[in-house]
Image: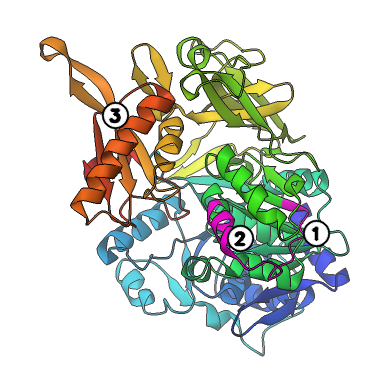
Amino acid sequence: MSTFIETIVAVAAESPKGMTTGEPHKPVRRPWADVIRNARGGAAELVASGLRPGDAVAILGAELSQTVHAAVSVWLAGGSTTMLHEPGHRANPEAWQTSTLHALRTVDASLVLLGRPYEAVAELLRARGHDARLIEELERPDADFAFTPVDVGEDAPILLQLTSGSTSEPKAARMTHGNLMANLRDFTRARDFGRPDDVMVSWVPLFHDMGMVGCFIGSLVSGMELVAVTPLEFMQYPGIWQELIHRHRGTITAAPNFAYLLMARQLAAAEPGSLDLSCVRIMGNGGEPIDPDGMRALEAAGARFGLDPRVLAPVYGAAENGVLITMSAEGEGVVVDAIDAAALEKERRAVPADPDAPPTEVRRFTLLGYVLPSVDLRIVGEKGEILGEREVGAIQLRGSSVTDAYSTEDGVVSSRTADGWLDMGDDGYLVGDRLVVCGRRKDVIIMGGRNIFPTDIERSATAVEGVRAGNVIAVRVAEDGVGGIHKEGFAVLAESRQHADPAAAERIREAVAARVLSDVGVRPARVVVLPPATLPKTSSGKLRRSAALNLL
């Protein structure tokens, strides 16, 4: 039996901790012992109905108690899981149907388990040749709760984690039991998950590696209390996050950067004494570029409520490594590296600079912590040479926690280069043993011999009054130069609640162009002001720059 299965069974048998769902209206707490007991019954039903070791099972549901039950049942039955993305309330039904069917082909799902409120999707799936069942069929009161988990090895797949699709066609990272357990050991030991008073608070979706591995499975293997709400509940009322931390004395939480920008705004407007966040010891921030100014704003706003700035923990992660690749040290907080803009953009070197220098002369990046023990990480130049400290190049990984393969519609393909390394598609550099990520390689904007990362432009535009924070995209475009010669430029697309006011929209366009020129030293070819919720994003909230071109 795999170490992962042995661990969750043993921890559940010994730990009094559990999982609370249904906040804030109908909270229900289930001890981990009950979660595993009920999943034994679900696994017995799956095996009896023909599920074989290694089979891929896709899961779609909105109720956390159901989706968690389905996932653990599949694992105890020897299968692997893929959490399907729920349709957002603005999603095009036909587009969601197409992407869901594409995902099922990508992972070659032998079964789809459907929870509330998606039971009616079963008919559609069966018409397309997919075996579909309701999760409630795995919740029988007469199930075999003494079922012995199916014996699978460390090389068996356990998670086929769909990549976000922010930069390419979606595929699924194939995580084995061994890969997953190596990553879990790394990050739970690095920050001592599972202390007696530890409580994880999460709203991050289970179809995202941060939500599934970092928050749910990390709590399960650590025997730690977990309080979880759905992403929909968070988006409808983002304040629920800090309120649950306050109410349940949450010590650990994690989210992408945009959520911390929202938290900073809400804390700045909250009544003094209404919250106590002094209980927090880890606030993991990853999944998208981290805004140093946004983190400083959170530090300032959180101080009134006892939030220690040292608990902010920037990280770097990916589904290809379970979840975390790096982890900030305890008590380190947010550390910003100020580097010379010209050296970065023209020479691909991260030369330390005066942080108070004019904006056009300095770029500021957040250090993302130390590489975890199961990962080897290197920075590689354009000719394949291994680069040294503060030299900018491609981030590549290998190690026991790193996936060997992707699932695609064309079958299983290797994720590694010929010499065994996985290229992450990100450019970055090392500062001693700590990692800095500059941005996605394919998104770099080349102008006048400068390699400009779009995040620098986006942060500058976000500072303009009327622009929605975290809702700006800079994309490469071709523009006409002297003599009709095409040259590369860029456009800025910014969301604003003032988009319908022609005078306000024009003011924002002019202000964004001027601010970007002032901060980055280049002028956008176009600035487009859009209504809220217009910019394309992945299901986990990442901006989709390539898809944004369709809005121009």
| 78 relative position to 453: left or right | right
Location of residue 398 (image quadrant): top right
| 508 relative position to 235: left or right | left
Q: Residue at x 73, y 55 (%)?
A: 307
Q: In the rendered structure, which disc, 2 or 3, sits on the residue that comes first in sequence?
A: 2
CA distance separating discs 2 and 3: 34 Å
Colouring convention used in this rendered image of the protein: rainbow
Mark in the foreground, 2 or 1: 2
On the image, numbered disc 1 is attached to which residue? 222
Question: x and y percent of residue 253 in the render?
Answer: 68, 57
User: Where are the magenta residues, as a range?
Assistant: 261-282
Quarter of the image that includes the N terminus: bottom right
Q: In the rendered structure, which disc, 2 or 1, sits on the residue that comes first in sequence?
A: 1
Residue type for callout 1: Ser
Q: Residue at x 33, y 77 (%)?
A: 123
Q: Magenta segment: does it hold 314?
A: no
Q: Residue at x 47, y 76 (%)?
A: 133
CA distance separating discs 3 and 1: 49 Å
Q: Residue at x 79, y 64 (%)?
A: 224
- Res. 72 in view: no
Q: In the rendered structure, which disc, 3 or 1, sits on the residue that comes first in sequence?
A: 1
Mark in the foreground, 2 or 3: 2
On the image, numbered disc 2 is attached to which residue? 267
Secondary-structure class at tag 1: helix
- Res. 283 in view: yes
Location of residue 275 (image quadrant): bottom right
On the image, numbered disc 3 is attached to which residue? 524
